[in-house]
């Protein structure tokens, strides 16, 4: 293997000091060149711009400029790196950059807003893969260079970067498949899929990966095979980790993978002694961890419970029979319009069903029609509504709903003054069973829509939501069901209201 | 030798603190742009990819470098553009 690689690339006996990525701090001290100092200072500027950019993202008014600032930081980091003395050939870079930029821009400009969870998931995956590939290249370079005696922490970082990067990549691909609605042998991939001894196998795989990592760090010259096997097993592990997690738990998965993509970049930074990578990767890692925690809290479940998966099986037999024998009140669009017409305060609670039906524009139109009639209107967006953090907010923003009208669980404090709570394609986030101990969703913060004067639930059927549990809300006396496709139903209600 | 690792580690810990401080204030309505925007930042790994691609040490560095630049660039370009597209939609009354 060693000779094979040597044959692939006769190693230039380049000065060792330029190796190891772009101008690390310690090399600056060793070489003391002005150029290295300049590169490092420029990296510092880039890192500062990332931090400012993220800070400006915390307000809708400044968010767009914040993103531009962050992009400027990236541009600076890229341009400065191109000036690194270790870079002698620009053709590969140019080709790769053009291909990557075209593909990235194409995806970003083409993607529908309803498909945004998949898009974000896939981008996470590419980030992780890039880090893993850089780590592999760094290993091969160390491996082929007889003059180089890599530090222990460099080897450990390469191993971690490979592991995290590959898990991020294949995990994101699996999440992409689930979100895109792919099927496996006729069954939707978005269902939780637990293989026999699933968790045991996953833990074993992780342990083997760590073992391989130890082999690599003990004697890297004899461990090229271990690195290859490590990449393969980490790829399998990524699939196994995500496959058992059901569709509605995707907000947690996406935030977690987001965090991993940052941590992969961070460990690559350790391997290359590049502090720009360390800082930026850590920022992203931290942001992903925070989001993951917010998502778990919003479901009142531990991260371990979510990652263990298996939650949200198909409709259970018990649930199906329990629904029988109870009656629900039903309304058509005309009656619903009549009720809405006389309401003064209306809360709209959207869920994943709104995204599936592409009903956001119809919902926004209903909102503006009601507003014109002097109705006080607010949208209640649950943190885990949809398939990624903030999913509903993006869709409503696309439909031109002003962000001042978007609220969260704070709406509960005004729920008793609400005339109509209109639930569109949401289920578990309005299930009063969450307040009852012993239910699978016990303790999950919900919208207390049952406290509103009238609850309208726009839904295709009485089927339970993702959690697979029946929703007693549907059978309440103050609940009316609007059965049908959300987009059609809301459009009809708007038409009725306009006639009046 | 250990000093370099110590330096790296100190930077890492401080950056995590900064990250937690800065991001914990992002409101729920901006969670998606935060995710895609921070995801674009994780494309910083392109810095490492560029060096690999520019080394010119043989076939392995060309191939891995090319792939790394492509993947990282998709992440960077896609991430920033899609974030900008989303943020452009958030409007006031």
Image (spheres, rainbow, N blue to C red):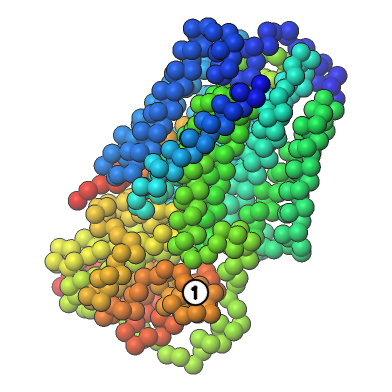
Identified at 64% across, 19% down, the residue is A20
**For this view, does B12 lie left or right of residue A411?**
right
Provide residue A190's location: percent of width, then percent of height.
59, 60
Which residue occupies the foreground of this view, A164 or A348?
A: A164
Residue A125 occupies quadrant: top right
Residue A232 occupies quadrant: top right
Q: Chain of mark 1?
A: A
Note whether A194 is above or below A26 in the view shown.
below
The quarter of the rendered structure image containing the N terminus of chain B is: top right
Q: Is residue A226 visible?
A: no
Identified at 40% across, 34% down, the residue is A51
Provide residue A300's location: percent of width, then percent of height.
49, 66
Which residue occupies the foreground of this view, A362 or A164?
A: A164
Q: Is residue A412 visible?
A: yes
Residue most extreme to the bottom: A325
The residue labelled by disc 1 is: A442
**For this view, does A463 lie left or right of residue A53?**
right
Which residue occupies the foreground of this view, B26 or A324?
A: B26
Residue A346 occupies quadrant: bottom left
Provide residue B15's location: percent of width, then percent of height.
48, 35
Identified at 79% across, 46% down, the residue is A208
Note whether A22 is above or below A432 in the view shown.
above
Q: Secondary structure at mark 1?
A: loop
Provide residue A231's location: percent of width, then percent of height.
73, 38
Note whether A473 is above or below A240 in the view shown.
below
Identified at 35% across, 38% down, the residue is A55
Note whether B79 is above or below A154 in the view shown.
below
> Disc count in the image?
1
């Amino acid at each position: 293997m060693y000779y094979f690689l040597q044959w692939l690339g006769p190693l230039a006996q380049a000065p060792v000091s330029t190796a190891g990525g772009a101008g690390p701090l310690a090399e600056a001290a060793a070489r003391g060149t002005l150029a290295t100092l300049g590169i490092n200072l420029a990296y510092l500027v880039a890192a500062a711009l990332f931090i400012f950019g993220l800070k400006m993202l915390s307000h809708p008014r400044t968010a767009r400029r914040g993103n531009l600032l962050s992009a400027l930081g990236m541009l600076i980091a890229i341009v400065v790196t191109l000036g690194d003395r270790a870079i002698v050939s620009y053709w590969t870079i140019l080709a790769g950059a053009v291909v990557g930029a075209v593909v990235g821009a194409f995806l970003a400009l083409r993607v529908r807003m309803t498909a945004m969870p998949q898009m974000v998931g896939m981008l996470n995956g590419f980030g992780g893969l890039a880090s893993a590939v850089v780590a592999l290249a760094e290993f091969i370079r160390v491996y082929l260079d007889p003059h180089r005696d890599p530090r222990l922490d460099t080897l450990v970082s390469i191993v971690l970067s490979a592991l995290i990067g590959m898990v991020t990549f294949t995990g994101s691909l699996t999440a992409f498949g689930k979100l895109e609605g792919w099927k496996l042998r006729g069954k939707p991939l978005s269902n939780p899929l637990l293989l026999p001894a699933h968790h045991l196998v996953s833990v074993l795989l992780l342990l083997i990966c760590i073992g391989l990592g130890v082999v690599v760090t003990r004697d890297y010259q004899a461990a090229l095979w271990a690195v290859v096997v490590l990449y393969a097993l980490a790829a399998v592990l990524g699939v196994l980790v995500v496959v058992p997690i059901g569709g509605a738990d995707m907000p947690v998965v996406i935030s977690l993978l987001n965090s991993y993509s940052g941590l992969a970049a961070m460990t690559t930074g350790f391997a290359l002694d590049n502090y720009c990578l360390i800082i930026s990767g850590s920022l992203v890692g931290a942001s992903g961890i925070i989001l993951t925690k917010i998502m778990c809290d919003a479901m009142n479940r531990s991260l371990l419970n979510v990652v263990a998966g298996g939650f949200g099986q198909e409709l259970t037999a018990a649930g199906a029979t329990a629904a029988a024998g109870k009656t629900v009140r039903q309304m058509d669009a005309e009656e619903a319009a009549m009720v809405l017409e006389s309401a003064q305060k209306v809360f709209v609670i959207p869920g994943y069903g709104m995204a599936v039906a592409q009903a956001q524009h119809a919902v926004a139109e209903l909102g503006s029609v009601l507003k014109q009639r002097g109705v006080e209107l607010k949208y209640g967006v649950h943190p885990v509504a949809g398939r990624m953090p903030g999913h509903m907010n993006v869709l409503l923003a696309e439909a031109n709903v002003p962000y001042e009208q978007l609220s969260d669980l704070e709406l509960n404090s005004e729920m008793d003054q609400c005339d109509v709570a209109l639930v569109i394609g949401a289920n578990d986030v309005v299930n009063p069973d969450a307040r009852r101990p012993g239910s699978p969703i016990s303790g999950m913060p919900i919208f207390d829509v049952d406290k509103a004067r009238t609850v309208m639930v726009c839904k295709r059927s009485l089927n339970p939501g993702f959690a697979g549990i029946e929703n007693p809300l549907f059978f309440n006396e103050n609940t009316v069901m609007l059965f049908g496709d959300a987009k059609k139903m809301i459009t009809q209600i708007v038409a009725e209201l306009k006639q009046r | 030798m250990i000093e370099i690792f110590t330096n790296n580690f100190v930077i890492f810990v401080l950056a995590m603190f900064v990250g937690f401080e800065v991001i914990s204030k992002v409101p729920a309505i901006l969670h998606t742009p935060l995710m895609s925007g921070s995801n674009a930042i994780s494309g910083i790994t392109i810095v490492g990819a560029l060096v690999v691609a520019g080394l010119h040490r043989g076939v392995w560095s060309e191939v891995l470098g090319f792939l790394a630049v492509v993947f990282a660039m998709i992440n960077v370009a896609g991430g920033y553009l899609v974030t900008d597209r989303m943020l452009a939609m958030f409007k006031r009354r």
